[in-house]
Amino acid sequence: MQPPAIIWDVDGTLVDTAEQHFSAWSRLAAGLNFPFTRADFAATFGMRNPEILRQLFDPGATDERCRELGERKEDLYRASVREEGTKLLPGVAALLSGLAARGCPQAVGSSAPLGNLDLLLGVTDTRRYFGAVVSGDDVSRGKPDPEVFLTAAARLGVSPERCVVFEDAVAGVEAARAGGMRCVAVTFVGHHPAEKLRAAGADLVVGSLADVTVDDVAALVRG
């Protein structure tokens, strides 16, 4: 039997840069004279910038306005990552190498802009593991729509039924299931509680990816 294909979300799953994202959104919102709370951050985590901006700040914002504000936010975010750095979350390094050794194709499927992903994969020295990197720039519909994951599967040349998605957000879990994929959800960063991730359709919910083995992942596809 062919090994499973793995599609990784990045923020909150591969790395934790949540505080840098929150700070960037807070600074952008302050400059626009809008409030931005922890609840706003949690409710929109995993979405693309245009959806976040229209949901929280301006429902009628044009595409050009969304691009402008999104670029301002990401400039703030990337500057903080360059200054502070980031590390892989627990269990990630072992899973990346173990899955590669088992011959599992791996891809990134993230709502983040490509510039963010290039920076994070470079800082963590993980780009070599991924046969495809799909960003929010590559799709027209953000999570919970499955477009980002379906695009990643297509670029790997595998069927959705063979894919297991690693996620930490409800919107991402919903996207995986809408795409016909299995999903492992991790609660380590704490954006969403385990019960909400299960309700969204996660096949396996863990506190940390250190609790997941390659055999666990393979069993989800066999099952």
Image (cartoon, helix red, strand yellow):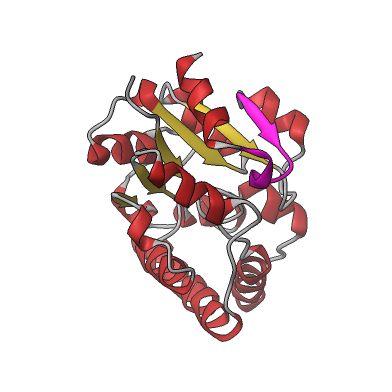
In the image, farthest residue toward the front: 101
Side (left or right) of 166 relative to 137: right
Residue occupying image coordinates x 37% and y 54%: 129
Residue 69: where, in percent of width, then height? 46, 69
Side (left or right) of 52 relative to 90: left
Q: Is residue 84 magenta?
A: no
Total marks in image: 0
Q: Quadrant of residue 38?
A: bottom right
Residue occupying image coordinates x 33% and y 40%: 105
Residue 71: where, in percent of width, then height? 42, 71
The segment highlighted magenta reads: 203-212
Residue 193: where, in percent of width, then height? 77, 38
Residue occupying image coordinates x 28% and y 49%: 131
User: Residue 127: in sight, yes or no?
Assistant: yes
User: Residue 60: in sight, yes or no?
Assistant: no
Q: Is residue 207 magenta?
A: yes
Side (left or right) of 186 relative to 149: right
Q: Judge by depth and name the residue closer to the eye, 106 or 52.
A: 106
Residue 58: where, in percent of width, then height? 54, 56
Q: Judge by depth and name the residue closer to the eye, 159 or 75.
A: 159
Query: Eyeballing the image, is 193 above or below 210?
Result: above
Q: Quadrant of residue 86?
A: bottom right
Side (left or right) of 197 relative to 195: left
In the image, farthest residue toward the bottom: 83
Q: Quadrant of the N terminus?
A: top left
Residue occupying image coordinates x 54% and y 56%: 93
Q: Judge by depth and name the residue closer to the eye, 61 or 153.
A: 153
Query: Eyeballing the image, is 174 above or below 78?
Result: above
Q: Judge by depth and name the residue closer to the eye, 25 or 206.
A: 206
Q: Quadrant of residue 24?
A: bottom right
